[in-house]
């Protein structure tokens, strides 16, 4: 079997598993809420109305005192026929296991169609006027917002991707415009970790691609690249004047990334749904338990000789 076929089979299996997990989650949610909302708990020694679950043993008529239905039509649920509400531990277990998958799917849809961050995104390509004496060709500056919501990192920032191209190599760097530090993304031989961003850093970038830093024009270009990056947040990238380079390309706009507050609101919302679901379940259980206790007390007061329907 070819590599492409292996990937296709793996993708199909993954899709089937995800679909089954989604369907199972929905079935589990329907099950626990149907049992919570529509299955009346029947005490071991009390018969109840089949419609509303009201205790009818010892009532003085053939109509349910709670909902008014004719017990001959609706029927009476005997203790052996009763369907008890779901146990607290089972509800919390299934609620915890089944809610995340629909929550993740709905959150993904909400993030995709929700409000955008509209953060600045700018692109500027600069070419050395005399590449032969400069010893390098191009500097590309790309300002971009960055959001990483993987795990619990929730990183957010304003960054500048910098590419410096010489006759023999291209080097890439990422400058954090908030902290004014940079990381070397050039690959093999790149300096690890964050380093302070300053003019000396730009000069080292130029040297790494073979630029002739003894040339006065190259020194002016180093100054200009440093100034453009340093002043991006206060003045914008493409709105600053450029004197030491030829501008090959320039564009400015806003990113289509989702608004950060909207992304962070998703787990908060689903946590509220999770806690609220448990609270609602406990409230329903307490309410029905109180009604059941009231019915038992009423029946006990009537005694075994009460006239009416009995089972």
Image (tube, rainbow, N blue to C red):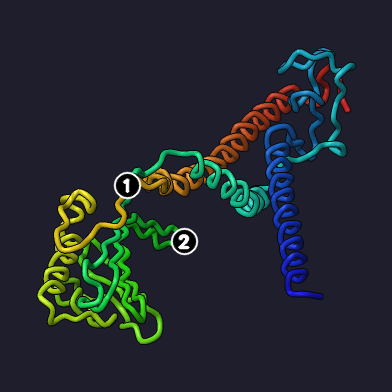
Taking 199 as reference, is 224 above or below it? above
Q: Position of residue 243 (x, y in %)?
A: 14, 59
Q: Secondary structure at mark 1?
A: loop
Q: Position of residue 306 (x, y in %)?
A: 81, 19
Q: Residues within 10 Å of mark 1 (few under 14, many from 20)?
A: some
- Gap in Å between the C-alphas at discs 2 and 1? 20 Å
Query: Closer to the camera, 310 or 187?
Result: 187
Which residue in the structure is indicated by mark 1? 119
Q: Residue at x 73, y 52 (%)?
A: 19
Mark identifier at residue 56: none
User: Horizontal placement of 263 versus 163: left or right?
Assistant: right
Taking 38 as reference, is 123 above or below it? below
Q: Residue at x 19, y 65 (%)?
A: 225
Which residue in the structure is indicated by mark 2? 150
Q: Nearer the viewer, mark 2 or mark 1?
A: 1
Taking 4 as reference, is 78 above or below it? above
Query: Closer to the camera, 268 or 198?
Result: 198
Q: Residue at x 54, y 47 (%)?
A: 108
Residue 219: image quadrant is bottom left
User: Horizontal placement of 66 versus 190: left or right?
Assistant: right
Q: Residue at x 86, y 32 (%)?
A: 78
């Amino acid at each position: 079997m070819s590599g492409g076929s292996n990937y296709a089979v793996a993708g199909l299996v993954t899709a089937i598993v995800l679909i089954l997990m989604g369907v199972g989650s929905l079935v589990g949610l329907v099950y626990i809420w149907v049992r919570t909302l529509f299955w009346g708990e029947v005490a071991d020694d009390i018969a109840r109305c089949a419609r509303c679950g009201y205790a009818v043993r010892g009532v003085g008529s053939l109509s349910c005192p709670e909902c008014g239905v004719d017990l001959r039509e609706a029927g009476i649920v005997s203790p052996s026929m009763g369907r008890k509400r779901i146990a607290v531990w089972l509800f919390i277990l299934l609620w915890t296991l089944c809610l995340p998958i629909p929550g993740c799917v709905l959150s993904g849809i909400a993030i995709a169609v929700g409000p955008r961050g509209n953060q600045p995104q700018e692109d500027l390509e600069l070419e050395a006027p005399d590449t032969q004496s400069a010893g390098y060709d191009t500097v590309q500056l790309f300002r971009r917002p960055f959001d990483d919501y993987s795990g619990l990192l929730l990183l957010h920032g304003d960054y500048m991707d910098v590419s410096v191209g010489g006759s023999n190599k291209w080097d890439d760097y990422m400058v954090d415009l908030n902290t004014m530090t940079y990381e070397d993304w050039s690959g093999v031989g790149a300096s690890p970790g964050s380093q302070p961003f300053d003019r000396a850093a730009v000069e080292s970038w130029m040297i790494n691609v073979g630029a002739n830093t003894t040339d006065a024009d190259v020194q002016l270009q180093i100054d200009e690249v440093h100034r453009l990056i340093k002043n991006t947040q206060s003045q914008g990238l493409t709105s600053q004047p450029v004197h030491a380079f030829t501008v090959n390309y320039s564009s400015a706009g806003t990113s289509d990334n989702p608004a950060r507050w909207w992304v962070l609101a998703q787990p908060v919302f689903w946590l509220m749904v999770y806690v609220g679901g448990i609270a609602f379940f406990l409230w329903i259980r307490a309410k029905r338990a109180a009604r059941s206790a009231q019915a038992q007390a009423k029946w006990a007061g009537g005694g075994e000789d009460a006239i009416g329907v009995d089972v």
